[in-house]
């Protein structure tokens, strides 16, 4: 991620992603490639903890609590889309 970010913020500095990674490793040390790793891991962790269970909860709540079983079965894709949108709001 750090190489991609630097390529985007300073386009003429590196010839590509591999050159950027090699140059960063030479000039700043190999640990420079791990900058921001903690924030990325926390972000993925929060996503996994919040979105997937929220999606399952909202899907069950909409299908079983708000709609009749026949209507929910006929509109399974719509229920899944709404549940996904609501789960994304939680994240």
Image (cartoon, rainbow, N blue to C red):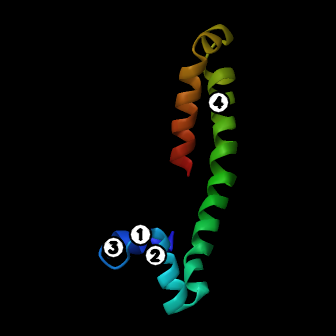
The disc at residue 9 is 3
The residue depicted at 51 percent of the width and 77 percent of the height is 21
Closer to the N terminus: mark 4 or mark 1?
1
Disc 1 designates what residue? Answer: 16
What number is the disc on residue 19? 2
Q: CA distance from mark 4 to mark 1?
A: 43 Å
Q: Quadrant of residue 68?
A: top right
Q: Give whichever of 65, 58 is nearer the camera.
A: 58
From the viewer's perspective, is the residue at label 2 or at label 3 nearer? 2
Residue 70 in picture, x, y percent from top left: 65, 7
Q: Earlier in the sequence, mark 2 or mark 3?
A: 3
Residue plotted at (53% across, 89% down):
26
Q: Position of residue 79 (x, y in %)?
A: 58, 24
Q: To which quarter of the image does residue 49 belong?
A: bottom right
Disc 2 from disc 1: Cα separation: 5 Å
What is the C-alpha distance between the residues marked 2 and 3? 15 Å
Reply above or below: 38 against 25. above
N-terminal-most mark, 2 or 4: 2
Spot occupied by residue 45 in the image (x, y as percentages of width and height): 67, 60
Which residue matches tag 4? 59
Q: Quadrant of residue 67?
A: top right
């Amino acid at each position: 991620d750090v190489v991609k970010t630097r390529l985007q913020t300073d386009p003429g500095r590196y010839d590509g992603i591999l050159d950027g990674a090699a140059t960063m490793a030479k000039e700043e040390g190999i640990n420079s490639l791990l900058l921001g790793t903690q924030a990325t891991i926390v972000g993925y962790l929060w996503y996994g903890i919040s979105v997937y269970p929220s999606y399952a909860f909202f899907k069950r709540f909409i299908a079983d609590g708000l709609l009749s079983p026949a209507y929910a079965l006929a509109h399974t894709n719509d229920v899944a889309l709404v549940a996904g949108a609501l789960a994304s709001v939680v994240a």
